[in-house]
Amino acid sequence: MNRFSLVLIVLTLLLAPSLGSANPNGVGSGTFDAQCGGACHGDADMNRSTTATVVVNAPSVAYEGLLTSVSVTVSDIETTATGLLGFFLLSDLSGAGDTPADAGWTIVSNSEGGTENYVEAVIASGQTQHTVHWTLRAPSVGTATLHAAIHHGSEDGSEAPFFGATMTPATIEVVEVPEDLPRLAADFEPPVRRTVGESTTVVLSTEHVSDVSVEWRVSGGEMNTVSVASVADGSWSFTLPASLQPVQLEWRAHLEGDGPDQTTPWFQLQSEEPSWSVDETAAYVQSIAMLLVLMVAFLSLQRQSTTPVKEFEAFDHEEVA
Amino acid sequence: MVSAPTLHVVTTELAVGSFAMAGIGFLLAGLGSHGWFGMKRHLQLADHVAHFALAFGLLALPFAIMTGIQSSPGEGLDHPLLINKMLLGSSAFGLAFGVLLARRTHGKDIWASPGGRRWQALGGMSAVGMVLLTASLGGTFTRGESLLSWLPVSFDSVPLMPLWLSAGLIVAALANMGLMRRQDAA
């Protein structure tokens, strides 16, 4: 093979892959800095500006250590080939150390059924607006800001990467919790996922609360109430009905006590089809069996096959020299 | 602190790069041992490169597997692709280890017999192919696409054997190995 042919083959192989910087099938939910620190869309410098508008909605005041709800709404969404749209909730846009956790926030849940600051939603063709909700535990007293950003590809199949962010961040004043404020206990963590067909019993831990009422809804549906039973002092129990298909159910609690009445943010509960399962022991044992069988089978094969031919020199030393 | 997904990328590239080099080495060694395309003079070089790259790939493989498990979303083996990836990976590991052991047992004479040279080259290339397919399944799992997506093979179902059959195969393999060692010692 002459050198020209070799160079031609190498050049063909180098030029064969399509040049794209986006990640057409997304990267899945995760905890990422802005633009995934450059890991999702190739190089951040290659991003184009999206025409979509990103707005983060948050209450102006939150209580230190208590739960609050934040939503990110993207409008004028550009249709993409896969429909994937990535949402970031961030504490700033520097691209490093800018997740909400870096600023002291704790993400309790998001409306996609996870606890990450980056989620991917599939946008139907023609849909122009989508909102993702996060429930967070507020950081220490002070002024906090929250930004939002989005990632997406293009519709023309060029895999061009697009990025957009909020023009102005949401500013939240985090204040101390009044002594007698009815509230959820600091260690309460709402369930975020469940299996289709199973009802969910939630045990609510509260402080300075004398009465609780809970209401729930399927996203976008009508409001329903559920009866709440007092289990113990500061502990309440209620059951959310089972769903028949994978849907998102939202619930919130009204807390009454000596202090001013409080309403918790909407908590999202995603129901999913039962996950695929397998007998893991059988899989592990079969894995070991296949390893040993193939190894021994090959050794046996070579043992049978290797009958040296005296006339054959394995290595042609003269030619090598 | 380096995250598990980042380490997985590093270790995977290390393992896959080594195996890819081993694959080319076995191809050239196979051609050289048969005296085809004037490659016979490169047999020694190709033989050494193939087996050393294969051994290095096998050393890197456990690190790729461990970081892969740590960076995998969800808990446990909850997807058919993951099970198939594990089965294919362990099969590749076994075959590659067999290829290396055969080379160690028979030395350079493994290229001297028609059967030996044929199976050594094919075994090495098959092991490499299986490892590359295993790595490709990782891309299918995380991104929904991979370099080998065009292959007409579906990994959505798992060919799982009963536990007793797997255990029986392990016993048979170990017995076979013991018999081979005994005959070699005699």
Image (spheres, coloured by chain):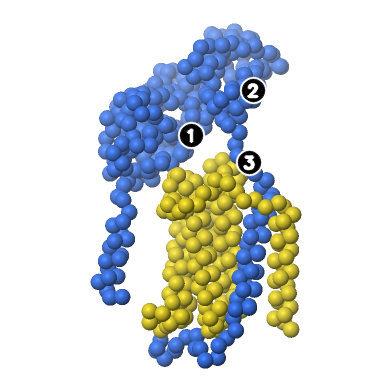
Chain colours: A blue, B yellow
Label 3: chain?
A: A
Q: Is residue B182 above or below residue A284?
A: below
Marks 2/1 same chain: yes
Front: mark 1 or 3: 3
Identity of the amino acid at label 2?
A: Ser
Tag 1 residue:
A116
Residue at 53% from the left image edge and 65% from the top image edge: B127
Identity of the amino acid at label 3?
A: Ser
Tag 3 residue:
A277
Q: In the image, residue B183 lies at what x, y percent?
A: 72, 80
Q: Earlier in the sequence, mark 3 or mark 2?
A: 2
Crowd around label 1: few <14 · some 14–19 · many ≥20 (10 Å): many
**Local SS, label 3:** loop
Crowd around label 3: few <14 · some 14–19 · many ≥20 (10 Å): few
- Residue that extends furthest to the front in the rendered view of this protein: B152
Q: In the image, residue B168 lies at what x, y percent?
A: 74, 60
Q: Which mark is residue A199?
A: 2
Front: mark 3 or 2: 3
Front: mark 2 or 1: 2
